[in-house]
Image (tube, rainbow, N blue to C red):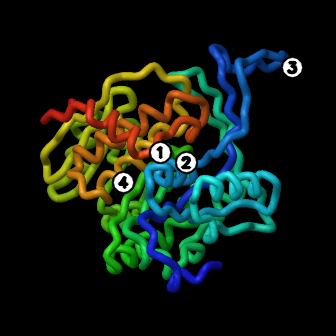
Amino acid sequence: MADYGLAPAVDLVVVGDCNPDVLVLGDDVTPAFGQQEKLVSSMSLVIGGSAAITAVAAARLGLRVALVAAVGDDAAGRFMLGQLAGEGVDVTAVAVRADAPTGMTVALSRGDDRAILTATGAVATLTAADVPTALLTRARHLHVSAYFLVERSLSPGLAALFGTARAAGSTTSLDTNWDPAENWGDDRLRAVLAQTDLLVPNEAEALGISGKGTLAEAVAALGSAGTRLVVKLGSRGALCVLGGRLHRVGVPPVRPVDTTGAGDCFNAGLIAGLLRGLALPEAAALGCAVGAASTQAAGGTGSSPDLVSAMSLARTATIRPADSG
């Protein structure tokens, strides 16, 4: 493990899932059981895992990024480590488990929608002890992805990790992603949220976490005064909440090739914007730009842009006061 006490500071530490995506694209990607074979447009092995995608997208935006995750000591794990290192992501703190396989996801994508099958493998073994304290204290921002995939192993120590990062001057953010169990958290999640500077769910996740029936109710519950909240709305952009004030943010619509990882790329743009000193709505505009650009090729990182391209698209964004309806 690297001696982060002697290493240069990093802009962003991303904690969470790291696994290959087997990406299946086509107009009809619904499997037919009964031993029927169907042909699809393409199938590829690409960088997957929300945390890994966010890390790569952030590195392409010029941030110094370190990833903390867990993979198996197998070909899939070596594939991920090689791909991430090639993108400039520091993978020194990625734990390699000899007793668990690397997680794997099959994403069935038909452009504007997808279905996801995941075997968590080593992903679900990540613990707070795997996160080097010296790395946290030298980072400008700590982001956790896919909370519910690592809930059992990571959540017991996550609030303390966030507290350590904040005490060292770092800001923190959380994207829970979808909860496969649909339980939507407990007291441990609430403890983490109390240490979270920025919560970044999508609309369905905001409803689940809040336990509310409408977006307006979810925003009222999650975006209390002083809390920063950005709700991702897909092709409709994003809703920013800060101190009870709401803004709608969006870029001109694009025709998606594949939406895999668009929300994770949005997170990278949002964080990059905040670290550049942008106000929350302007940072969300950069997030929308990165997310939109990422849909123009297959895979979560297939077309995630560089900073110049992302900022050019972000300048076309609209930002307006809005209600949450």
Which picture quadrant has residue 95?
bottom right
Task: Assign a secondary structure to mark 4.
Answer: helix
Q: CA distance from mark 3 to mark 2?
A: 33 Å
Which residue was labeled with disc 3?
35
For the residue carrying disc 2, how many other residues have a C-alpha within 10 Å: few (<14), some (14-19), or many (20+)? many
Answer above or below: position of 200 versus 26: below
The kind of residue on which mark 2 rests is Ile
Task: Assign a secondary structure to mark 2.
Answer: helix
Task: Assign a secondary structure to mark 1.
Answer: helix
Residue 267 coordinates in the image, percent (x, y): 41, 48
**Callout 4–callout 1 Cβ contact below 8 Å:** no
Q: Residue at x 52, y 39 (%)?
A: 261
Name the residue at the right extreme. 35
Which residue was labeled with disc 2?
53
Tell whether 21 sits left or right of 187. Answer: right
Which residue was labeled with disc 4?
271
